[in-house]
Amino acid sequence: MRPLNYKEVKKQKIRFILVYIITLIIVFCSSCFTIITASKGVTVLEDKYAGYNKIFEDQAGITFDLDEIIKKLHQIKGGKRTLSEHKQFQLLISKLRISIEKIIKESDAKPDTFLLYEEVLVEIKTIQSVIDRFGIAEEEYLQDKEMYERCIQRYRDLNRN
């Protein structure tokens, strides 16, 4: 025995199965799209993290080098140094400054990432040139003072005779 509305029930079952299959396909496609998009997002985030981490490491290294430069500047300024020691300190400072400039130039970061460090390097270069001028002037002063003392000594020796 078949029900009288057998054809309608069969149509509704087929319609339900079709809607159910279409819904499953939509859910599956949406899930795939979500997973693909999420994996691309994770890749982008990992790349950004690696980039930021590299910038942070560069900035930490530059800060350490700047600290060394400042210490060396204080050592030059604070102590009595011979001209060769003075030149050696200036050479060490210049090498550190050049290495920092190289790190900044080789960085893949945006140009304004290291802007503050570039300004500090310009100031350090200016300080170095001022210290050099003062070092040369001090050396000349000491030479002139020594020559003046020799002249005074000779004058005294001549007046005694």
Image (cartoon, rainbow, N blue to C red):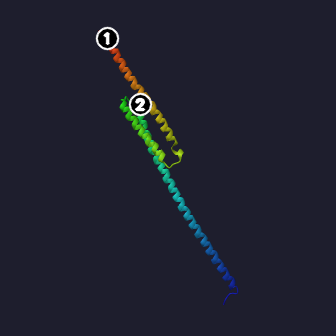
The residue that appears at 53% across and 48% down in the rendered structure is 110
Residue 18 vertical placement versus 5 (above, below): above
Q: How many numbered dots are placed on residues in this image?
A: 2
Instruction: From the top left corner, tell me how far across and down residue 105 is, in percent.
Output: 48, 45
Nearer the observer, disc 1 or disc 2? 1
Task: Please name the residue that numbered disc 1 is placed on.
Answer: 158
The image shows residue 23 at horizontal and vertical percentages of 62, 72
Q: Name the image quarter holding residue 141.
A: top left
In the picture, measured across the screen, residue 2 lies left or right of residue 62, that is right
Q: Position of residue 51 (x, y in %)?
A: 49, 52
User: In the image, residue 160 lies at what x, y percent?
Assistant: 30, 9
Real-space CA distance between mark 1 and mark 2, rounded to the nearest whole angstrom: 40 Å
Q: Quadrant of residue 62?
A: top left
Q: Which mark is residue 34?
A: none
Mark 2: which amino acid?
A: Lys
Tell me the SS state at disc 2. helix
Question: Which residue corresponds to mark 2?
Answer: 77
Check whether the beta carbons of the residues at disc 1 and disc 2 lie within 8 A of each other.
no
| Mark 1 residue type | Leu
**Residue at 51% across, 38% down:** 119
The image shows residue 42, relative to residue 150, as above or below, that is below
142 horizontally vs 18: left or right: left
**35 left or right of 13 in image:** left
Left or right relative to 115: residue 98: left
Q: Secondary structure at mark 1?
A: helix
- Give the quadrant of residue 15: bottom right
